[in-house]
Amino acid sequence: MQSTRTFKDKLFLILKGLGMGAANKVPGVSGGVVAFVAGFYEEFIHSLKRVNLTAFKLLFNGRFRSFFSYINGKFLSLLFFGMLVSYFSVSKILDYYIKHYELYVWSIFFGMIIGSIYYISKDFKDWKPTTYLAILIGAIIGISISFLDPAMENDNLWFVFICGIISVSGMALPGFSGSFILILLGNYVLLLVDSVNALYDTFYEILGGNFSFIDNIERLRTLKVLIVFTLGSIIGLVSFSHVLSYILKHYKSVTTASIIGFIVGSLGVVWPWKETVFKTDISGANILDKRGKYIIENYRRYIPEFESETYIAIFYILIGIATVLGLEWYGRKTRQTHA
């Protein structure tokens, strides 16, 4: 599975990891879509599948080089390095732009998903009743999820562990947004904002020789939550990869059709023109949870009026489409070069 990678290949693999990490952070967008469009989805799934009993035997016997080679370690390490960097850089930039230019950010992602649907479906030739049905079911599930009401935040460690297992589906299953699932479970802010920020602040303080966080009960609790969430995510990702690898091998057409359906359904989640509806009390005031965060009840989607802001948003949708088509062009050119 491993192949000789040039410096350029390694750099672009890190950039793809950045893209996956950023996509996983945005509700409604799936990191798996980035992997699918960028052309490394199957290698990603099959590499994770190699994290099995044989791999652990190599590891525990001290055969680290054989272990690294067996799991396609160069590929996974570069990809996960990009994701890790993304969580401490690109993700924070995205947080800023979503806060200040929300409509345009959603527009770009909406366009990217439209481009992804085109990219995946254009080479799909196995059209038959079962694949049409798979697309329909995938789209219905994706759309239905987008209209579910979010739950309240829950920091119980067992629940956090389950959140990790479920949310990582966005990396393994294109079109299935793990971050949006976390919103529905009520733990998006806790697990992808507060916990990541706590880890960032802790690293920053340690580098400055400041270890006062040891006495910060709230910080330690948040870090403990992040560790449990990460453990659940790792277990979930490896488990999903084994299942998906088998399905891709034996039911590739139906699986690809289902993925197209999921991605089509995710358009409802990233529809740019929507506003957050917060839970209110009898007086109409927004209700805060125990952590001082406003409780999200739902999202109200609407058809925009044709004004300057709408035209700008449409322009960004076209940029999103062009970005995916550009990635497709680059991937095709790269494959032709290596051929």
Image (tube, rainbow, N blue to C red):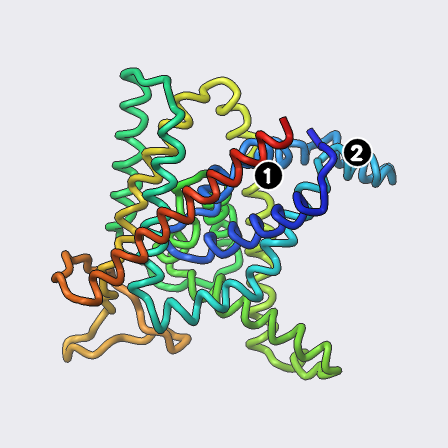
Helix, strand or loop under label 1: helix
Q: Earlier in the sequence, mark 1 or mark 2?
A: 2
Q: Amino acid at mark 2?
A: Lys
- Residue 238: give its label: 1
Q: Looking at the picture, how far across and down is residue 191, in whole percent?
A: 49, 62
Distance between the Cα atoms at labels 1 and 2? 16 Å
Percent of width and height locating residue 216: 61, 80
Identify the residue under disc 2: 57
Is residue 95 visible in the rendered structure shown here? Answer: yes
Q: Is 263 left or right of 156, judged from the image as shown?
A: left
Q: Residue at x 71, y 39 (%)?
A: 5
Residue 144: percent from the left, percent from the top?
25, 43
Q: Is residue 183 above or below residue 43?
A: below
Query: Between 256 and 214, which is closer to the camera in this rendering?
Result: 256
Quarter of the image holding residue 300? Answer: bottom left
Identity of the residue drawn at 30% across and 41% down: 142
- Which mark identifies residue 180? none
Which quarter of the image is occupied by the N terminus?
Answer: top right
